Amino acid sequence: MNTNAAPVPAPSSGDLVTNVIMVGILAAVILIYFLNNPLKHSRDFKIRCFFNWFPLGLTYAFLYMARYNLTVAKSSLGDLISNQSFGDIFGIGSVVYGCAFLINGPMTEKIGGKKAIMIGSAGSLIMNILMGCALYSALNGGLAVQTLVTAFMILYALNMYFQSFGAVAVVKVNSHWFNIKERGVLGGIFGTLISLGLFYAFNWGDMIVEASRAVPSPNIGVLEQALRALLHINGTVDQIWYVFFIPAFILLVFFFIIMFAVKDSPEEAGFPAFDLGDASETEEGSQNLEGLALMKKLLTNPIILTIASIEFCSGILRQSVMHWYKLFVHHFGTMPQYASSFSAANFFCDNWGLLLCFAGILGGMCAGFISDKLFGSRRGPSAVLLYAVMLVCVIALVFCLRDNQLAVGVIMMVMSLCVIGVHGMLSGTATMDFGGKKAAATATGLVDGFVYLGTGFQAFALGRITSMGANEQLAWSSGWSYWPVFMIPFAIVGLILSIKIWKAFPGAKK
């Protein structure tokens, strides 16, 4: 017996503890929902409403997992997909998402939110299966690299088309179930569920990738071990395609849950209609508008257009942080001359999904509290305060990007908190307020479309900016040094536009 053999590290239980924390967060969200009852709804109504929004919210969260798994795959595949190719794939998908509102918003108004999210879930799960198959073929020698990139461009664009049903469907359904006085807290709740989606995408995604390695880490986590055994992982090739297959399976499960649990309105569930207190009550004739006429009405609404412009900036800032920080750390952290100074960044990268989740929860809840409790359910003040913090952060990032990676990581978290708070408050809540239940889906589609047009713009731009001088010995003279500079103008414009809607409120309650 070799008594000098190194001990085998015990499996890590960190992933198990983290997921228990997530269950606790879900329980807290549910408790907040039941405690927040300004209209004194009956107990039966609150319970039935819960079984409506909760499955919707989780489905939307898992749509996030089926959207951002591309980023997880890119981080794991290294040079198989270059920064520029990744930026192009995500950029094309984002532009498709942004333009899809022209079709999907009016369609959702006509068919209802329930059918819309079922279409989105079904389409996304099929596209994820096909992307998993393409990656399987590439990693096993069946597809050339350029063919894989082309396949991903097409399949991810189609995935993002179906993904675009998610936000409009959720808002369309909730616009019938929640009064304006409840929607600030609801925005915080859905900000939390969006943040859980980021946790599922990044932490669960990383867990799936680690479990699917041909040669696992010696201290692989308990859940990763269980997943590895369940999937019978073995062989000589990393089976990273599971990062697409598993979200597809989860969406299939929720497709059937939505089918049986969700109703488009309280009336369909056997409850009487009630005053929503939003633009539904004042915009006479809106219920008779359809398609292009409804779109024209929204496109001539200065408040909706201002919110959409703010969210264009939010899309740029949000994804500039969410997608590029880990790639930034991977780029410099692997260089011997910078590795030691990037040790602090490893904590943020290793817990990226969890930290984004916490940041998003705090951002969503803070934005909702500020709006409903401090400013009488006006959404503008929340956006102003959060954008002001983002501007300070992105300017600070310019000065500490090279020399203080702990500060960079903290800035990433604070910016994520702010931008998720703004996004939940404007795309998820203000669109219900100013669109009303008759135009909520179209308004949300328009605003969320601008978010993803901003996302596409930053993807194309940063994919090229971060590729400049990639092979230079003086790495800090490469395009990465322009990463924070790129964000500054959009933080300024977003702040100015947010100030313009400080006093905006639906006509019913002016």
Image: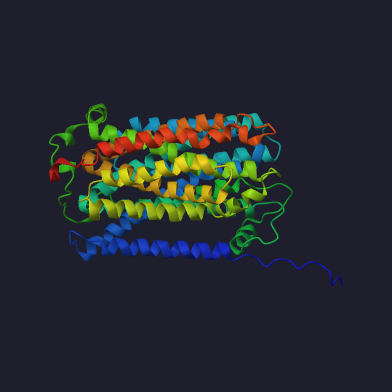
Q: Is residue 28 above or below residue 248?
A: below
Give percent across and percent down for residue 293. 22, 27
Residue at the (31%, 43%) spot, across then down: 384
Q: Is residue 91 above or below residue 202?
A: above
Q: Is residue 290 left or right of residue 460?
A: left
Q: Quadrant of residue 474?
A: top right
Residue at the (60%, 52%) spot, across then down: 346
Split into 4 quadrants, where in the image is the C terminus? top left
The residue closer to the viewer here, 374 or 453, is: 374
Residue at the (60%, 29%) spot, across then down: 468
Q: Is residue 407 left or right of residue 26?
A: right
The residue closer to the viewer here, 190 or 415, is: 415
Q: Is residue 474 left or right of residue 417?
A: right
Q: Is residue 365 at least partly visible in the picture?
A: yes
Give percent across and percent down for residue 195. 43, 52
Q: Is residue 477 above or below residue 506?
A: above
Residue at the (34%, 55%) spot, across then down: 365
Give percent across and percent down for residue 265. 24, 50
Split into 4 quadrants, where in the image is the N terminus? bottom right
User: Quick one: which residue is furthest to the right in this view?
Assistant: 1
Q: How many marks?
A: 0
Give percent across and percent down for residue 42. 19, 63
- Judging from the image, the colouring scheme is rainbow
Q: Is residue 81 at least partly visible in the picture?
A: no
